[in-house]
Image (cartoon, helix red, strand yellow):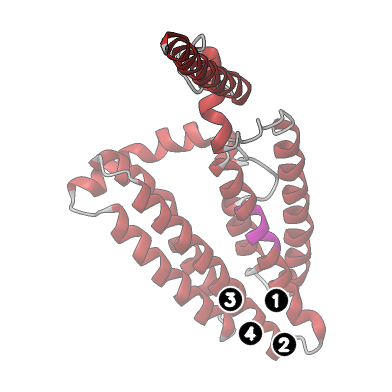
Amino acid sequence: MFDGRWRDTVDRATGPAGRTLQRSGVTADMLTATGLLSAAATAVAVASGHLHLGILLLILTGLHDLLDGPVAKASGTSSVRGAFFDSVTDRVSDALILGGVAWYLVSTHPGHLVILPFAVLAATTLVSYQRAKAESLGISAKGGLMERAERMILLGFGFLSPVFLVPVLWIMLVLTCITAMGRFLKVWRLAEAPVPAAVPRRHRRTRTVARSGGRTASASPSRWRARRQGELASRSGRTWRARNARQGIRQRSGRRQP
C-alpha cells in the first residue's frame, strides 16, 4: 500500500535525508548490505527471546531499506544492478527474520505452530514473485494490503508482547494471501489482450516480400513454382525447335543428293 499509493509522498519525505547521507559518503549498496546485517541481528534477537530488542533492530532494518533508494537517486547511481541487489537482500532479510520467529516459536509454542512463519514467508515470496514476473512482462503489479513495509510494521507490533505474536502472524498470513490474490486478478485482467503468435522463420521472408509488392523473385512458393514451370516449358520448346531444325536440314540434304 505504501509502495503502490504513497510512494511519491515517501520519496519526497526521504529525499533530503538521502541527499545528506550521499554527501556524507554513504552509498546505496552500503545501506543495502548493512540492512541485511540488521535483519540477521533481528533474527538472532527474536530467536533468543529478546523481542523488544528485535523491535529496535527491525526499525533499523526498515530505515536501511527506506533510505537506500533516495541515496541512489541523490548520487545518480540508480541502476539495474542496484535494484537487483536490493530485491535479493529483501528476500533474504524476510527469510532471516521469519526464521528467527520460527526458532522462537519452537521453544515457546511446541507443536505445529512453528509452520506459521514459514507459511507467511511462502505467501510473501509469492507476492514478490508476482510483481517481478508482471514487470518483466511490462505490467505493473504494485499495491495491495500487505506489502513489505506493512509486513515490517505489523511484525513490529507482534514483537511488543509474546501474546501478540501469534495472532499477528495469522493476520499477516491472511492479508498477504489476499494481496497475492488481488495482484493475480489485476495482472490477469491487464493481460487479457492476446499475444500475437510467433511467425515461423521460413514464412517471414514470404510475408515481407508480399508486403513490398512482390519485387523479390522468391515472393511465394506458388510464384516460384509457376516461374520454374515456365522455365522448363521454355527449355522444352527450345529443344523441340532445335530438333525440328535438325530434321529439316537432314531432309533438305537428302533431296539435294542425285
The quadrant where residue 32 appears: bottom left
Graded by Cα atoms within 10 Å as few (under 14), some (14 to 19) or many (20 or more), the crowding at tag 2 reads few
Q: CB atoms at circles 1 and 4 under 8 Å apart?
A: no
C-alpha distance separating marks 2 and 3: 13 Å
First along the sequence among labels 2 and 4: 4
Residue 124 has which mark? Answer: none
Q: Secondary structure at mark 4?
A: helix
Q: CB atoms at circles 2 and 4 under 8 Å apart?
A: no
C-alpha distance separating marks 3 and 1: 8 Å
Would you place residue 112 above or below residue 64 in this image? below
First along the sequence among labels 2 and 3: 3
Q: CB atoms at circles 3 and 1 under 8 Å apart?
A: yes
Q: CB atoms at circles 2 and 1 under 8 Å apart?
A: yes
The mark closer to the camera, 4 or 3, is 4
Q: Amino acid at mark 2?
A: Thr
The percent position of residue 78, horizontal first and vertical second, equals 32, 43
Identify the residue at the far front of this view: 258
Residue 68 appears in view: no
Q: Amino acid at mark 3?
A: Leu
First along the sequence among labels 3 and 1: 3
Residue that badge 3 annotates: 51
The mark closer to the camera, 2 or 1, is 2
Residue that badge 1 annotates: 162
Q: The C terminus appears in which quarter of the rendering?
A: top left
Q: Amino acid at mark 4?
A: Trp
First along the sequence among labels 2 and 1: 2
